[in-house]
Image (tube, rainbow, N blue to C red):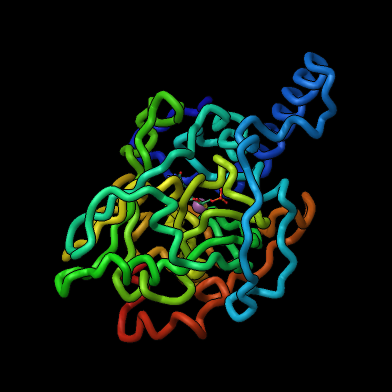
Amino acid sequence: MLIRRKRPGDCAHVQPSEITPEGVYLNRRLLLQAALAAGATGLGAAAWPTASQAKVTDLSFKRNQRFSTTETPNSYEDVTTYNNFYEFGTGKGDPVANSGRFKPEPWTVTISGEAEVKGKFALEDILKPHALEERVYRLRCVEAWSMVIPWVGVPLAEVVKRCKPTSKAKYVAFKTVMRPAEMPGQRYPVLEWPYVEGLRMDEAMHPLSLLAVGLYGKTLPNQNGAPLRLVTPWKYGFKGIKSIVEIRFTEREPPTSWNIAASHEYGFYANVNPQVDHPRWSQARERHIGAGLFNSRVPTQMFNGYAKEVADLYRGMDLRKNF
Ligand SMILES: Nc1nc2c(c(=O)[nH]1)N[C@H]1C(S)=C(S)[C@@H](COP(=O)(O)O)O[C@H]1N2
Ligand SMILES: [Mo]
């Protein structure tokens, strides 16, 4: 259910000043629904976070310490009830509330474009040769909030290599599934659907880029992008495209959803950069979710704290122009 309908071009993320009241409102609404559900079924309140979590199962994996922050992860509840997934609505509580009917299995991913290995593959076949890793990464949304999340997935570079991109492949483009029957937000022109994103080839090959299939040791809940999503921790959250059905290798820079929606506000690179403000709000500080309602904002770090690892990718580029 959408709270507000926005015109395309005016559909950018809500102002940080709007987030807290909206979040509080939504939480209250969710709690109300939970109370009603509990009353109706006789189940405890613990039953409420979602129909969509019903299929979540355990994964086996190894923690990759080298690529993990030592910061304390947010709670499973924070991570799975405060989401951006506009296919299920624009409110932070909408994805958990509205994704129960989404079916993340069986799942296929199409590999296309400038690669030798192309076609439609079962997700299991794409993942099978690779060991799953757990990596604790920060997620920094362009709306100036952040979370720390223990993801489980495989390095994107390993999957890219197996596709054998041709010498023409300069970019990797990603596409989200289009299923208006299961994704009520896609019935509204909030963004141009399906959601699309892209990375430059060297960004895709960077060891930090992760194709996630789980979090907190379990398969992804629908609201977090089941069954397959991108995680690039040095970039704003909106680069982390969810429920991926296509990976396409391209010669030209591919279009990206937020850039299509508001090109002056969202560039292709989307690197976390406290010195480049969003036109409507500052990026200098962030609010850490879960740290309490009255927590102060903490300074945002260049590349979300991953400067040592990724700064070389952008040597010689003007990051004010390439925002
Ligand atoms: N398909 C799709 N992917 C998406 C989005 C979306 O609306 N649709 N929102 C993005 C944004 S703005 C953020 S901050 C992250 C949030 O991921 P999380 O809800 O798992 O924390 O997902 C990103 N991926
Ligand atoms: Mo975001």
Quadrant of the rendered image containing residue 305: bottom right
Instruction: Establish if 64 lies above or below 218.
Output: below
What residue is at 20 percent from the left and 62 percent from the top? 250
> Would you say 302 lies left or right of 206 here?
right
Dividing the image into 4 quarters, which one contains the C terminus? Answer: bottom left
Q: How many marks?
A: 0
> Would you say 85 lies left or right of 58 here?
left
> Would you say 218 lies left or right of 258 here?
right
Q: Nearer the viewer, residue 244 or 301?
A: 244
What residue is at 22 percent from the left and 57 percent from the top? 118
Residue 76 position within the rendered picture, expressed as x and y whole percent measured from the top left = 71, 50
Instruction: Establish if 168 lies above or below 39.
Output: below
Q: Nearer the viewer, residue 9 or 229?
A: 229
Residue 244 position within the rendered picture, expressed as x and y whole percent measured from the top left = 39, 48
Q: Residue furthest top?
A: 40
Residue 24 position within the rendered picture, expressed as x and y whole percent measured from the top left = 71, 37
What residue is at 37 percent from the left and 81 percent from the top? 313
Q: Is residue 262 visible?
A: no
What residue is at 51 percent from the left and 36 percent from the top? 90
Instruction: Establish if 126 lies above or below 100.
Output: below
Residue 262 position within the rendered picture, expressed as x and y whole percent measured from the top left = 33, 48
Q: Is residue 110 visible?
A: yes
> Would you say 179 lies left or right of 88 here?
left
